[in-house]
Each structure stands twice: as structure tokens, then as C-alpha cells.
Image (cartoon, rainbow, N blue to C red):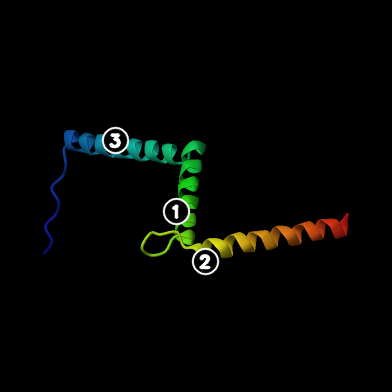
Amino acid sequence: MADKPTPKNAKEIEAELQASRQRLASTIDELAFRVQPKEVAKRQVESVKLKANDLTRSSDGEVAGEKVGAIVGGAGVALLLLGLLRRARG
């Protein structure tokens, strides 16, 4: 048979409630910090830097010229096409 849990006294219950309040307050503070626009922007900038680094570097950390060239060439073609579309519309 399962043992019945012993009833807690008021001091134990109050201590558990206080600990729960502190954990909740800490969690709320952390969430408030994470959603600050400054922090969100900082995380996004870091993410873009890491992605750019992954796209332009080889596995040994050297700049991959062919990757950079392909990215720059693709961006140039995209800008050229956008310019041509604007000229055709306007």
C-alpha cells in the first residue's frame, strides 16, 4: 500500500510558497530582459554575423573566395534585375 504523505504544517507551506514566488519572480525578470528591444536586436545582429561567417568561410576558417564571389555576384545580378524592373515600370 502507498504511504499517505504526512500533512504539512503552516511554516512548511509558507516556505514552499515563498520559494515558488522567488522562482516565478526570477523567471519573469529573465523574460522581461529577453524581450527588451535592445536585447532582441543584439541577438539578431549576432545571428546575422554568424550566418555571414558560415557563408563566407571554409571549414578551416579561411575566407572562401569562391563563396564570397558567388554571393557578391548574386547580389549584383539581383540589383541589376531590380533596376531593370523599375526602369520598365517607370
Amino acid, disc 3: Gln
Q: Quadrant of residue 23?
A: top left
N-terminal of the pair, mark 3 or mark 1, is: 3
Q: Which mark is residue 22?
A: 3
The residue where tag 2 is placed is 66
Residue at the image point whose x is 50% and y is 51% from the top: 48
Work out which quarter of the rendered image holds the C terminus and state it: bottom right
- Circle on res. 50: 1
Using the numbered discs, state the Cα–Cα distance from disc 3 to disc 2 in whole angstroms. 54 Å
Element assignment for label 2: helix
Residue 47 in the image: state x and y as whole percent: 47, 51
- Is the Cβ of the residue at disc 3 closer than 8 Å to that at disc 2? no
Q: Amino acid at mark 2?
A: Glu
67 sits to left or right of 22 = right
Towards the viewer: 85 or 11: 85
Q: Earlier in the sequence, mark 2 or mark 1?
A: 1
Q: Secondary structure at mark 1?
A: helix
